[in-house]
Image (cartoon, rainbow, N blue to C red):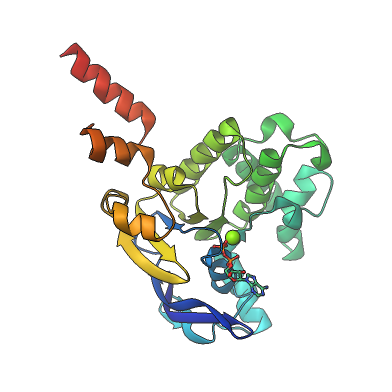
Amino acid sequence: MLATHNLSFSYQDETVLHDLTFDFGRCAVTGIVGENGCGKSTLFMNLNGVLRPNSGAVLWQGKPLNYSKAGLIEHRQRVTTVFQDPEQQIFYTDIDSDIAFSLRNLGVNEAEITRRVEHAIELVDAQSFRHKPIQYLSHGQKKRVAIAGALVMEADYLLLDEPTAGLDPSGRQQMIEIIARIATQGKHVVISSHDIDLIYEVCDGVYVMNRGKIVAQGSPGTVFSQSEMLRAAGLVQPWLVKLHSELGFPLCKTETQLFNALRETKEA
Ligand SMILES: Nc1ncnc2c1ncn2[C@@H]1O[C@H](COP(=O)(O)OP(=O)(O)O)[C@@H](O)[C@H]1O
Ligand SMILES: [Mg+2]
């Protein structure tokens, strides 16, 4: 299981992560919300071993990460990360080669590569643009290719840093469906975002960060009912929670659920 224990991290003399203890094994989909600059991307770089904590630790199965080259290669097969900018993770112009890149690096046999690439393309719903050169894809499609490139590792954990940043509404909706689909494959997904509605809809567990500290944690319903805490962290309540707390509407996880509940009340 992936966790951290009292992790602190500084860039030069500025401490940006303060004494953070996370347990990412508890929920299938864990969300980390916090305003820009609160430390989400820095945390993800600590979780995949690109950066090393100044104190405390990243834990895998209860043991501190091994930062040797071999240790990190092993760690990144269990925990794969997709960063915000897909351009940084795209190496080829054709999608299949790009998705297969890390597996070829590891010397996985071609039959296995084909199987995993097919499965990943299906999960991110990339069949329709699979044969286009990558440079012609939209930002959202590039993000899906980057996620497929991580999924082929068949890691236990997938970390998605700001998966909906820069996406249009339909791209965002597709991303929500992709995340739900990945979670049903028995993987743990950790999502960082300042898109509060996204985190509310797709996560079973939530941490709120404010200036490098954890200021709340728990189920989305509980965490997002705390409007004062959210305001202090520079965030707002998800709109579905606001309708519940301000107007007494039923507390629903998705728009569809809310509309169905309201239709039933109207018909009754
Ligand atoms: N390479 C870096 N060197 C120095 N400071 C950095 C660096 N990267 C990020 N920071 C600072 O660390 C803090 C956290 O940034 P970041 O992890 O990117 O936050 P988030 O992803 O939540 O927006 C910010 O104050 C940012 O300015
Ligand atoms: Mg960031």
> Could you tell me which residue is drawn at 68 percent across and 32 percent down?
127
Q: How many marks?
A: 0
Closer to the camera, 233 or 184? Answer: 233
Location of the C terminus by quadrant is top left
Relative horizontal placement of residue 229, taking residue 195 as reference (left or right): left
**To which quarter of the image does residue 130 belong?**
top right
- Residue 135 visible to the viewer: yes
Location of the N terminus by quadrant is bottom left
Q: Ligand 1 quadrant?
A: bottom right
Q: Position of residue 210 (x, y in %)?
A: 43, 66
Tell me if residue 209 comes above or below residue 64 in the rendering. above
Q: Position of residue 125 (x, y in %)?
A: 61, 35
Q: Position of residue 23 (x, y in %)?
A: 38, 68
Closer to the camera, 196 or 260? Answer: 196
Tell me if residue 141 comes above or below residue 18 in the rendering. above
**To which quarter of the image does residue 27 belong?**
bottom left
| Residue at the limit of the structure toward the top, as seen here | 267
- Residue 219 visible to the viewer: no
Relative horizontal placement of residue 41, taking residue 243 as reference (left or right): right
Q: Position of residue 256 (x, y in %)?
A: 37, 27
> Could you tell me which residue is drawn at 43 percent across and 42 percent down?
197
Closer to the camera, 63 or 162? Answer: 162
| Residue at the limit of the structure toward the left, as seen here | 268
Relative horizontal placement of residue 243, taking residue 71 as reference (left or right): left
